[in-house]
Image (tube, rainbow, N blue to C red):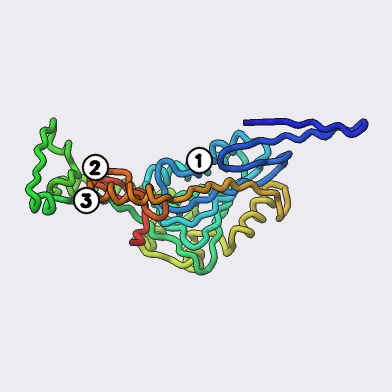
Amino acid sequence: MVAGAVIVFGTGLLLIVYTAAPSDGITVLARDRIAILPLRGVITANHRVIRELREYRDDSSVRGFVLWVNSPGGEVAPSQTIYRELARVREEGYPVVAAIASVGASGAYYAALGADTILAMPGSLVGSIGVLMEFPNAQELLEKVGLRFEVIKSSEHKDLGSPYREVTEAERALLQEVVDDVYDQFLEVIAEERGLSRDSVIEVADGRLLSGRLAMDYGLIDGEGDLVDAIAVAGNMAGLGPEPRTVLREERRAVTWWDLLRSLAALATGRGGAVGPLGESWPSLDQGPRLMYLLRYR
């Protein structure tokens, strides 16, 4: 929604244009600025960073980006999408700087690799490079309540990852092949973006956590800094100086009792829709296998 107001004083003309959006309030006479993209919580397919990146690319006032990271990672494909979108705007000439706050692990670190520069505090948690695939197994529970599912399938592996039975050794080998391939993709991007050899990446890519200082020693990040430092770096790269104007769209969503009850009911019935405290999807019986670049925090 766009509204305009024109005020005339004598021979002078003052034009004020208000632009309103559900998430960013009001912007008055927007000029050259750096867009701050908060990468918070577990990364899923509908993460706000993906949407906002694409919207900001159509905003002529945005001259650069800062990815503000505080995330344990998340699903593989959305993490790769954020990385790809950041790399794309970087190739278009926009400066991109990532600032890791408390945590920038696994898929969040993967996403940050799309930046020109990655900063973190010495005590930030970085790394947890690896892949996991998980899905629930409710076979014993179903047997206790006398419930059994009959499955008619077109081929041997069509119900691979079913929560109603154990995984066979052949299926485990197939799933491991997928995990290993996605892990290799992670290693390839780190080696390419950080200018490291594959062997040096593998040395720390065993799922371990690193402090920001150790991550810098291993070449995973570029230097020490917080959000303010990242804004200064991006501003200088964009020719706007160390204190550029910034834009940050805050999304406010109150968690209601209805949300909590719905999540509990989803967990109790084994259906999808349960949401965790950081906005992540909790595992459910109908979810199936999920590939994750994720630091497990619970």
Image position of 38 (left or right of 289):
right
- Residue indicated by mark 3: 136
**Amino acid carrying mark 2 in the image:** Asp
Counting from the top left corner in percent of width and height, residue 58 is at 60, 33
In space, the residues marked 2 and 1 are separated at their CA atoms by 30 Å
Image quadrant holding the C terminus, namely bottom left
Q: Which mark is residue 85?
A: 1
Image position of 165 (left or right of 73):
left
Q: Secondary structure at mark 1?
A: helix
For the residue carrying disc 3, how many other residues have a C-alpha within 10 Å: few (<14), some (14-19), or many (20+)? some
State which quadrant residue 148 falls in: top left
In space, the residues marked 3 and 2 are separated at their CA atoms by 9 Å
What residue is drawn where x is 42% and y is 54%? 278
Image position of 170 (left or right of 109):
left
Can residue 217 be spotted in the picture? no
Mark closest to the chain's N terminus, 3 or 2:
3
Tell which of 57 and 138 is nearer to you.
138
Q: Nearer the viewer, mark 1 or mark 3?
A: 3
- Residue indicated by mark 2: 286
Tell which of 181 and 234 is nearer to you.
234
**Amino acid carrying mark 3 in the image:** Pro
Q: Nearer the viewer, mark 2 or mark 1?
A: 2
What residue is drawn where x is 30% and y is 51%? 264
**Amino acid carrying mark 1 in the image:** Glu
What residue is drawn where x is 92% and y is 32%? 10
Q: Are marks 3 and 2 in contact (CB under 8 Å)?
A: no
